[in-house]
Image (tube, rainbow, N blue to C red):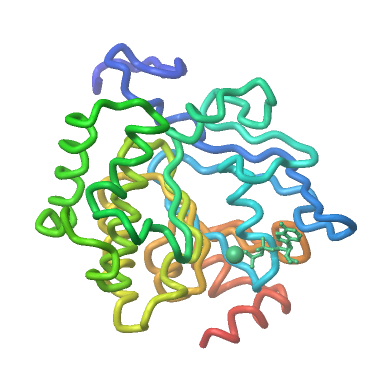
Amino acid sequence: TMTNTTVDTAAHDATGARDMTKPVLRLDDIRKSFGSTQVLRGISFEIRPHEVVALLGPSGSGKSTLMKCVNLLEQVDDGQIWLGDTDITDPRANQDQIRSRIGVVFQQFNLFPHMSVMKNVTLAAIKVHHWDRDRAEARALELLDRIGMRDKAGAYPDQLSGGQQQRVAIARALMTDPELLLLDEITSALDPMLVGEVLNMVAELKSQGTTILMATHEMSFAHDAADRIVLLRHGVIAENGTPREVMDESQNPETQEFFAHFR
Ligand code: ADP
Ligand code: MG
């Protein structure tokens, strides 16, 4: 409260609210190779509560690999990844439980084509996280309502635009109220006309306080919506700062060259 001058450093306060002082995600010297290709060569950074971090870098710079390591789709060779107080690189960690704490949306093929929107959104909650159907459907309707797509609950993916499909995929990723949302180039496969509605939804989530790590090539969105830019180059972090520091003011010639391509 305003009158309490002590700083609460416990993981949760008395009401169980999430701690605002600890990072949501912390990567500590992550290394990952495929064969002789060293993709991640010592990556360390943090994401604080409510931060939107844009992960940038040329194609092949390791953005997806980094996100897959966070989502446990790839195993790191070395280093640690902390989600809150959980070391998710510990082989004894409960993988399903960790995945329920992280929402993920990819570039494409997010929805199962033979399932309705409702089925798509509720499937993992029911099958993986063992929610009962009523609870899952109620939560799904609440999320679809928030994005103005409640009336599409019975529709199939091919009856939706690509932008609507990605918004449904984001809604699905939010089912378990994750601590962190990973968005991997979610607008890259979209018709340019449909990019805006998806980015608007990301901006909306940001305004609601969602903590987001997003790989993107939408530079003006990253500039305007991200709190921080992490730029990967040659397997290491070349830049980590505010959009202004990294995109407008960096004196590094390779950084300037990278952003010049998008102007
Ligand atoms: P980005 O998402 O930044 O485009 P990626 O993480 O997809 O980059 O890829 C980084 C590098 O790792 C590329 O050279 C890619 O070919 C390689 N790579 C990614 N996944 C695999 C894999 N499963 N097996 C072998 N090489 C891979
Ligand atoms: Mg990628």
Residue 55 vertical placement versus 69 (above, below): below
**Residue drawn at x 64%, y 79% as measured from the top left:** 258
Q: Which of the two residues, 138 or 207, is positioned nearer the viewer here?
A: 138
Quick one: which residue is furthest to the right in this view?
36
Q: Which of the two residues, 210 or 117, is positioned nearer the viewer here?
A: 117
- Position of residue 149 in the picture relative to residue 262 (left or right): left
- Position of residue 4 in the picture relative to residue 100 (left or right): left
x and y, in percent, of residue 52 in the image: 43, 53
Q: Quadrant of residue 247?
A: bottom right
Quick one: which residue is furthest to the top in this view?
14
Label count reads 0
**Residue drawn at x 18%, y 51% as measured from the top left:** 144
x and y, in percent, of residue 179 in the image: 41, 36
Quick one: which residue is furthest to the left in this view?
151
- Position of residue 202 in the picture relative to residue 137 (left or right): right
x and y, in percent, of residue 47 in the image: 52, 43
x and y, in percent, of residue 191 in the image: 36, 82
Q: Which of the two residues, 33 or 129, is positioned nearer the viewer here?
A: 129
**Residue drawn at x 34%, y 55% as measured from the top left:** 169
In the picture, the quarter occupied by the N terminus is: top left
Residue 200 vertical placement versus 151 (above, below): below
Q: Quadrant of residue 162?
A: bottom left
* Quadrant of the image where one finds ligand 2: bottom right
Q: Which of the two residues, 75 or 247, is positioned nearer the viewer here?
A: 75
Residue 230 vertical placement versus 14 (above, below): below
**Residue drawn at x 39%, y 15% as measured from the top left:** 6
